[in-house]
Amino acid sequence: MEAMDSQDVQVFEDPGLKRALHRCYAEERAPSRLCDRIRQMMRSEAEMSGGSGASVVEMKPVAMGMTPAQRVVAEVAAKRGLTIGAAWPGFAVAAMFAVAVGTIIIRYSGQSPLGTSPAALASALPTDFQQAAIAIHDHCCQSASHQGKDVPQAPYPAIGSYLRNQLNHPVLAANLEKDHWRFKGAAICPVNGIKAAHLVFLRDNGESLSVFSLPASALPDLKPNETVGEVSEGHAIVARSQDGAVYCLVGHSTDGQLKERDLDNVLAAHLGEASVAVGTAGQKTGRATVAGAAWVGRER
């Protein structure tokens, strides 16, 4: 530690790389949770080393007017007794890059490893499928009614049993009213040319959610018991292969706060409501959790 404190500041002097990083990450902001975690670690280190933690207080004037990322860098530098000076631009850009990586790590900490490449994700959840699911979701949410002919609209086990028998594959007729969603109706709708069971739910705050059930052949590259997530065209999408079917949730919110992780939590909580066997409803398939399932996700 003493050796580190005694070293001169290493100035970041690669103009090309700095410009590239600045273009990509100039608008990055460290989430408050990340900043708080770093501060807590610094205080703990100071206490363990016999320090008073006063450096955290002393560095506040240095951080005035800075972005969250810059404040974190300033605090770390002040704690180490470093003078940023002319080295600040490069140091800040490098810090923003670290913040971006740290944000991703924190977001997915405790969850299943992401492990799958973007190319593999694109194969498991292809763009044409995403676009088709989003188009049907938007159309049915905006339509005056979404109640298919002869499709029962209650109770949920009856909806699932009927649609399962009609489509010859398992159907997830999830009762999301327990989660404060308003049920608009159930119908059979085409997704990318494939008939799907489709339940639509709305909320008064402008959020909308579709629950699709399709045969596993709809997403042939999605492995059994694997869940993939995506944010596309302002919509969150989650798809899971299970029971020989694909359960796909598409959600949208006017403020953009409905994320694929939220949809995955909904899916995990209601998997046990799927109608799996012919003529049955609500057969338990086992509740899958994000931590126990293979999960891949990215946003664009």
Image: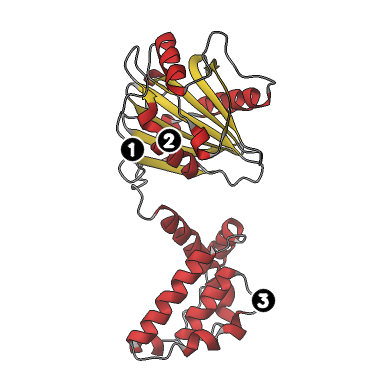
On screen, 141 above or below 19? above
Q: Which x, y percent locates residue 119?
A: 42, 36
Q: In the orientation shown, which residue stands out farthest toward the front?
A: 155
Instruction: Please state which amino acid type lies under the numbered disc 1.
Output: Ala
Label 2–label 3 contact, CB within 8 A: no
Instruction: Determine the CA span between mark 2 and mark 1.
Output: 8 Å
Q: Which mark is residue 267?
A: 2
Give yes or no for contact between labels 2 and 1 (Cβ–Cβ under 8 Å).
yes
Q: Examine the rendered structure and indicate whether residue 99 appears above or below residue 280.
A: below
**Above or below, 209 relative to 16:** above
Decide if residue 275 is on the left or right side of residue 29.
left
What residue lies at 42% left-to-right and 81% top-to-bottom? 43
The image shows residue 166 at horizontal and vertical percentages of: 44, 9
| Element marked by disc 2 | helix
How many residues crowd around disc 3 within 10 Å: few (fewer than 14), some, or many (20 or more)? few
Q: Which residue is mark 3?
A: 65
Q: Residue at x 67, y 76 (%)?
A: 65
Number of dots carrying numbers: 3
Mark 3 or 1: in front is 1
Identify the secondary structure beneath mark 1: loop
Marks 2 and 3, the one that precedes in the sequence: 3
Q: Residues within 10 Å of mark 2 (few under 14, many from 20)?
A: many
